[in-house]
Image (cartoon, rainbow, N blue to C red):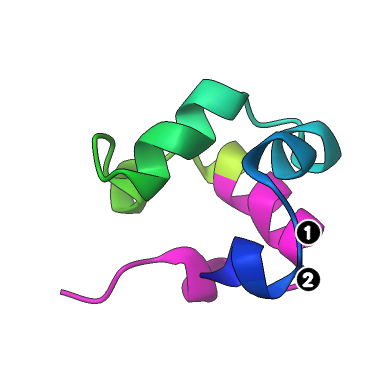
């Protein structure tokens, strides 16, 4: 949702953040748990999406 609100495609987010496209796809498809993501990836995604890391974590 944050990616879509930022007007970015998955590929654009991957390019801007440095996180692999496949990883972003897996997070969005819930094949990988973003709550267990590498801290580095969370920071890179948060910077690219202009949000804080806490916004990326799914509340259980």
Which residues make up the magenta segment? 42-60
User: Image check: 9 left or right of 58?
Assistant: right
Badge 1 crowding class, 10 Å Cα cut-off, few under 14, some 14 to 19, many 20 or more, is: some
Residue 43 highlighted magenta (yes or no) = yes
Indicate the quadrant where residue 47 lies.
Answer: bottom right
Distance (Cα) linking label 1 and label 2: 5 Å
Kindly tell me whether residue 44 is visible in this rendering. Answer: yes
Residue occupying the point 76% across, 65% down: 7
Quick check: 4 above or below 43? below
Using the image, tell me which numbered label, if any, was put on residue 47: 1
Question: Relative to 37, is 14 on the left or the right?
Answer: right
Residue 50, numbered circle: 2
Say which quarter of the image contains residue 13: top right
Instruction: Please provide percent x and percent y for residue 56.
Output: 48, 65
The quarter of the picture where residue 51 lies is bottom right
- What residue is at 84 percent from the left and 41 percent from the top? 16
Looking at this view, name the residue that lies furthest to the right.
Answer: 16
Marks 1/2 in contact by CB < 8 Å: the verdict is yes
Disc 1 is placed on an element classified as: helix
* In the image: residue 17, left or right of residue 30: right
């Amino acid at each position: 949702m944050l990616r879509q609100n930022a007007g970015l495609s998955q590929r654009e987010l991957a390019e801007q953040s440095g996180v692999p496209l496949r990883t972003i796809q897996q997070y969005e498809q819930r094949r990988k748990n973003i709550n267990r993501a590498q801290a580095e990836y969370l920071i890179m995604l948060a910077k690219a999406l202009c949000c804080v890391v806490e916004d990326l974590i799914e509340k259980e």
